[in-house]
Amino acid sequence: MRDPLPAGREALARHAWREAYDLLRAADSAGPLAPEDLEGLAEAAWWSGQLAAVIDARERAFRAYVDSGQQRRAGYVAVTLVRDYFSKRDAAVAGAWLSRAERLLEAEADSPEKAWLFRTKSVIAVEGQRDFAQGLEFALKTLDIAARVKDRDLLALGLHDQGRALLALGRAKEGMALMDEATVAAVGGELSPWATAAIYCNMIMECHHVADVRRAGEWSDAAKRWCDRQAIAGFPGMCRVYRAEVMRLRGAWKEAEAEARAACEELREFNLGYCAGAFYELGEIRLRVGDLSGAEEAFRNAHELGRDPQPGLTLLRLAQGRIPAALSSIKSAVAGQTRDRLLRARMLPALVEAAIAGQDLGTASAAVADLSAVAHDYGSPALEAMARSSAGVLHTARGEPEKAVEALREALRLWSELELPYEAARTRIALAELLGSGGDEDGRRLELESARAAFERLGARLDVARVTELLARVEPGQEPVRQATRTFMFTDIVRSTALVEAIGDEAWGDVVRWHDQVLRKLVATHRGDEVDHAGDGFFVAFPDAAAALDCAVAIQRALAEHRRDHGFAPQVRIGLHTVSALQAGGKYKGKGVHEAARIGALAGGGEIVISAQTREAAPAGLATTNPRSVPLKGLSEPVTVYTVLWQ
């Protein structure tokens, strides 16, 4: 049997990471390893995705270097432990190791170890503290030492970190050029594996921040080819997060979901920050395919691991019809990004959408101006497309159709050039509505048919259903159809068949006439529009949740009072649901109407049952009880409902 220590060293030199890890771990079990071999074990463990083993080996190497008086090398190992503990989200421990590294290296002459310290402080300043000027200062110190000690890895990393800081400071062209230069060194095989991995990963991350989709795709493909040539577990998981985003944006949703799920598994015990990003990406994918409960779960997992689930969570809330919650959460998220314009910019389109849905045009206007300024400063076509799309939606809400059409056509051109099919299809819907309102029915139909074809190819089932309904609008010359948010009420007399048998047809007719008269009067008083009246039930649309709730309570109280004063009144159940639906004249149709009808059927006699969306939109102080998640017949997603305490 060969000696595992020299065999492990040889495997390490070949970058056969898993083989090296197994051999060096066997050698470590047989007897104490020298600190240099412990560093080798840690490196092999890192590439194999074994973070606990990395930390254990490095901490033992650190103690061995300190005991033998090798202060400079101990300082370097302390620097690597800073990275490891940040990967675990143990910031306090990472900070303690940083202090140790500073104490050990502060009196040392310029050396690679000291440059690694400055490089780590630059990363912390940029990624953790968002202090980009400080990050630039540390990057320049790294470069200064690296040039004097002639260390290729540190020269490339310092150049790359300088570019990242400049990009964050708004000097986009200069910063991106430096990062490209550093990444060329990685592509050319001039650097060590770890430096190559770090530069690839950070380059794709910065492309993500600036929404440079094309460049992100190019470097992501290059990184994948490099990863495939290595026997690696940990780093590909980190790579997968950004690769999943690129795949999602390009429309390869099944492949993107597979990448995101693999990243979640690979990174769960390796890097919690990237694992959170993988869950967030999974949420974006599930939202687009129409799996709202799956998206909710993924965004919750991302949040629990420390990743702000915005802007995806806001888009989910809008899809659920929970407009106040959507607007409140995205406002808070944007307000918290005062120091990072790029992170804020990626949230602004969702803020515009939520603000317009909530009829807050002032907030939407400010968000469009902010997004347009960032797009201008950074010159990213994707940011420009976001800005034009948001401006088009805002002009539409303001009643400025000519400006809206111009902005949306430019956005559509940019999305198409970037080959981002989902964004292009959504823009087509907004453009189609404007064309239709301007009388261009042929143009409206062409845009909607193109959007539906794109959604069908992608597998965006909710979007397919929405466009199909839009295409099913009435022919020109009849009532126009539009999307409208209403609170729908469904009422029904409970056990009506038994009552007819008990009191007879004639008396039942009198009861129904009295019931109809009372309900119609109260509906009219509370600004409701009677949509339909079938048998002993009403379908009513209200402009908002407050009016619908006031009417529902008034109905139950009127019936209770008549029952108390006259000995009898029928038991009526009422259901309320706030949702968007298609409106043509006084008629409504769509999934939301079916949901409202089924929610009404959940109520018992004398009860008012409301959806979570209605509760969210209701005035403060509404008293409810019995929250529960219930399946609705014919619908794939369960809904949360509450019973109103009206007495």
Image (cartoon, grey):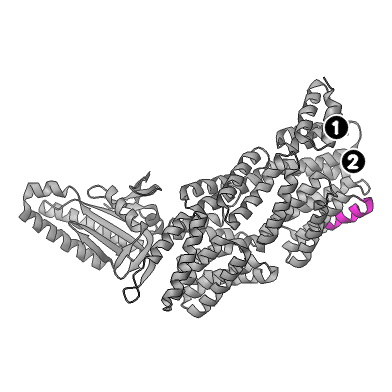
Q: Residue at x 8, y 46 (%)?
A: 502
Task: Assign the magenta stretch its main secondary structure.
Answer: helix
Q: CA distance from mark 1 to mark 2?
A: 26 Å
Is 531 situated left or right of 34 in this image? Answer: left
Residue 147 magenta-highlighted: yes
Q: Foreground: 626 or 283?
A: 283
In the rendered view, tell whether residue 465 sits above or below residue 112: below
Task: Locate residue 118 relative to residue 355 in the image: left or right.
Answer: right
Give coordinates of residue 231: x percent, y percent. 74, 38
Q: Magenta stretch: give its range.
A: 139-150
Which image quadrant is residue 519 in?
bottom left
Q: Is residue 352 magenta?
A: no
- Give the x, y percent position of residue 89: 67, 43
Q: Please name the residue that numbered disc 2 is placed on.
A: 72
Farthest top residue in view: 1
User: Residue 364's mark?
Assistant: none
Residue toward you, 61 or 391:
391
Instruction: Tell me: residue 510, above or below residue 373.
Output: above
Q: Are marks 1 and 2 in contact (CB under 8 Å)?
A: no
- Residue depicted at 79% across the width and 44% down the height: 98
In the rendered image, residue 589, in percent from the top left (x then y), is placed at 33, 62
Circle 1: residue type? Glu
The residue tagged 1 is 10
Question: In the picture, which quadrant includes the N terminus?
Answer: top right
